[in-house]
Every structure is written in C-alpha cells, then in structure tokens.
Amino acid sequence: MTRSRTRSPLARLVALLLLAAAWLAGCAGHAPSGHPHATPPPAPQDRQAPPAGPGPRLQDPPELVSRDGVLKATIVVERRKVQVGDHRLYALTYNGMYMPPTLRVRPGDRIDLTMTNRVREDTNVHVHGLHVSPRSPADDIFVAIKYGGSHHYTYRLPRTVTPGTYWYHSHADMMSAAQVAGGESGVIVVDGLRRYLPPSLRGITEHVVALKDFQIHGDSIRTHKLKIGTRTNRTVNGRQNPVISLRPGETQLWRLANIGANIYYRLHLKGGRFHVIAQDGYPVRRVYAADTLVIAAGARFDVLVQAGGRPGTTTLETLAYDTGKAGNRFPRTDLATVVTGGTPMAPARIPTDFAPNEDLAHAVIADRKTVVFTENDAGDEFYINARKYAPNRVDFTSVLGTVEEWTVRNDSDEEHSFHVHTNQFQLMSTDGKATDPDHRWFDTVNVPARGNVVIRVPFTDFTGRTVLHCHILNHEDMGMMAILDIVPPRDRGK
C-alpha cells in the first residue's frame, strides 16, 4: 500500500474508515457470528502494547528448500541485536534472524540439518508435529547442544507424512520457554496441499502468517522471569501490523502458525472468514468456514481467505480471550492491516470436499490411559498425574502398531494446550461433545479448564522415548511434561 507523506493524520483516518466500509460491503453475507462461547471481558489496558498504524508490507520469511529429495541446512543459534517489530533488540536468533528461514520439504525427503550453538546455555531443536523418529540422529529432544558445539540431525520423512504447516523450535530441558520467547522458532512447510485444491486455485498466492510475541527488558527481548499475562508485543513474521495485500475477489492461502512460547490467539478477520483446509499439518476431509479461530500455544491452521469484490481495508485481529480464573486474559490487538485493491479477479469457488483421511472411530483400542493436568495454588508448579517432569523416568508406555484412547483431564482453573510428540492424534470429543469426523486430526489441542478431551493415538513407524506436555512452555518448564516410551510389540509386558 502506498501512503502519501503529506496527508494529515485525520485524512489518513478518514481514508481508512472509508476503505473499511468498502471491504465490509464487498464481504456482505459473511457477517461474523462470534466465538461459540461467551465473549470474555476485555483485559486491562495496561497489559496491551500501544496500538500502531499500518506497518510495512508483509514479507514472507526466506526459505530453505529441499533439492533432489534432500533438505540440507545449517542453523546457527546466537544472540544478536536485530529488528524485532518496531524495535532493535537483542534476541536469540536462528541464522541471525528473529523470523528465521522457513524449511520447505516434501513427503519422502531427507532432512540433513546441522545446528551450531553460539549462546551460553544448552539448546537443541524439535520439529513440532512431524511424524519422524524420536531417536538420534532424528528428533531427539533429550539432546543438549553445548555452547560452541554442533549437532547433526538426519532423518527421512515418511512418504505418508501429511502436507501442511509445522514448526521448529528449541526444546531444551527446562529452558524451552525462555529460548522460544527469545526468538528460537521458525516455520516448516510440507508441500502437497495444492493437489487437493481445484485447478483454479492451485496457483494462488500463499503467505506464512507466523505469530510470535515478545516482551522487552532494557535493550533485549525478555527471556527469563516471563509472566504470561503481562504486556507483550505481537508480531506477524516478526513485523508489527504489516500490510497484507489482495486483489478484489482474490483467494489466498494463509499458513497461520502460533510459534511463540505461551500465549493464545483468537483470530478474526473483520468482514471475512477463514476457510480451513488443514490443521496442525493434517488436511481436512471437508473444508469448513470459521469467523474466529482459537489458536492455542503451538497450534496451526492452513486457511483460504477470499477478498471482497471491491477495494477496501480491514483488520486481522486477535480478539480478547480468557483462559480461566487461574489463567490469563489476553486483550484484543490488531495484528495486520489487510488491503484490497488493484485489478479485480473473478472469485473462485471455495472447495467443499478436500482430502481423504483415516477415521479411528472403529479402531481396535489396545489400551486406555488417563492424563491429568494439575497445578499448585501459587501457579509455579505444574503436574501430570500428580508428578513433575523427571528426565530419567518413563511415565507411560505404548506399543508400536496399536491404537490407544487417552482421556486428557484438566483439573485446574485454566486452559492448557496439550501436545504429544511423534504421532498426530484424532480428537474424539471435548467435554463429552463429539467432534466432527471431517476435521478431527491434531497434534496440539486446547483442554478446557475443569474439562477434558478424549483422543485416539495411532502408534506407527517409530519406537523410542518421546514426550507429551502442555505447550504453554512456562507450564512445561515448571513440570507439566511426561515421558512416553513407544516399544516394539515383543516388549509388551516387560
């Protein structure tokens, strides 16, 4: 979007209001219906970063792309002073960037990644959501890369890995919140979603919309003594309130990814809708439309967004969200300005049927487990089944080649973001209400306060020690993580 330097602030405000009205007129028939639950009260204003005007044009992160079936990459972790939103701050960077390269691969590719650590604390990297081995030299989160050291990760993605959006981030023992909050996170794209789109949509513009937030301490991003509910600065691809441009009638693919340490987003596009085609790296069977999307810590959605038929301006925002009386109240915040202009396009038909996927509703259940989240009154100790995380203790054992049903029960007064490594799962119900079988695959799911979810987990391809945890990383680091050992069938009963 081009803005005159000579226009007064009042003139700019009037222009934006007129463009917003035009956008809404162009999107008539798609009025937001709101969140299915009651709208929480607004958060105290002193917790909200000051509102900003439209920023620079949205820039997608640079990409490291697989070639001839191999993604060969080097990631260097170092503390550097970089541009972060509207500030220059010391951050924990990957390859010198707060918003590091997107790793772009295809099913069946081999990942050959070397991580070098130039920060003075142990670190590592986890590929969140990818169905790969939890054993070294693959996605071993028990690795500790020392200062000045390097670690070589190498593994092949199964040809059956599902296309969509994933992410990579530090999973250093008891330090993941600090390191991810400091900047150690980026996006992974597994290509293949476009083959399920109709021909008219296979060439559409695609954007990564990576949601990261940061708190400021002096001239640095705060990494320690993090308070989840305190004032924070939310960014899209490391920018504050960037401009996303569409042509009238244009359809784009947006990869929405919550890759911060702790906070939730309740995304809303004024006057528009999100047409969900994949969630947590798993394509849906039938596309569904949503006026708002709650994106818990660690979760992702791939969506189609279609502009109205006339020029206009609107806002991608996160609405106020309350995680419970023991949790946090996140305020409404503008994330990006969405501008429609240029040569109109004929609006494409949004598909209904999308991708085939497996339904575990009639699977043979080999075992049933209960996972209980609790915390102390002070909110500084968190437990799974009454125990804090211990790196040398196996808490659960499951058998390769089986399907299990787990009840994840939240006995606390705040919501928790449940995540399990290595295998995606099917969400069967939330608080006793069955989920839609056309879109029930996840790797990260929100568990209501004083509520529960029932999931079914298929254990395929890989054995080894892995983990399950709350993906609010402050909670994970304070104990809300457990070790799962996936064993071969012959080890049953040992």
Image (cartoon, grey):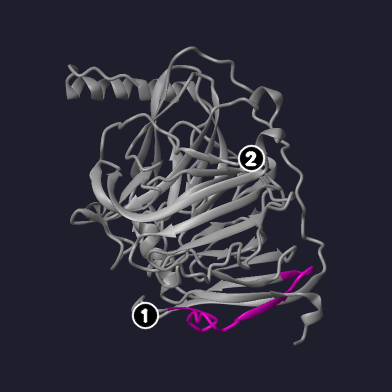
Q: Where is residue 72 in the image (x, y as percent from the top left)?
A: 57, 47
Q: Residue at x 67, y 47 (%)?
A: 109
Q: Position of residue 223 (x, y in %)?
A: 31, 62
**Residue 175 sits in which quadrant?**
bottom left
Q: How far apart are marks 1 and 2 (CA)?
A: 45 Å
Where the N terminus falls, by quadrant?
top left
Q: Position of residue 281 (x, y in %)?
A: 62, 49
Q: Which residue is drawn at 82% across and 68% down?
A: 364
Image position of 361 (left or right of 17) = right
396 drawn magenta: yes
Give me the disc on residue 377: 1
Secondary structure under the numbered disc 1 in the rendered image: loop
Q: Nearer the viewer, residue 384 or 267?
A: 384
Q: Which residue is drawn at 50% across and 84% down?
A: 387
Q: Residue at x 30, y 42 (%)?
A: 85
Amino acid under label 1?
Answer: Asp
Query: Which residues lie in the magenta part?
Result: 382-404
Going from N to C along the chain, the mark reached first, 1 or 2, is 2
Callout 2 environment at 10 Å: few (<14), some (14 to 19), or many (20+)? some
* Residue under pointer 2: 191
Amino acid under label 2?
Answer: Asp
Above or below, 433 against 24 in this view is: below
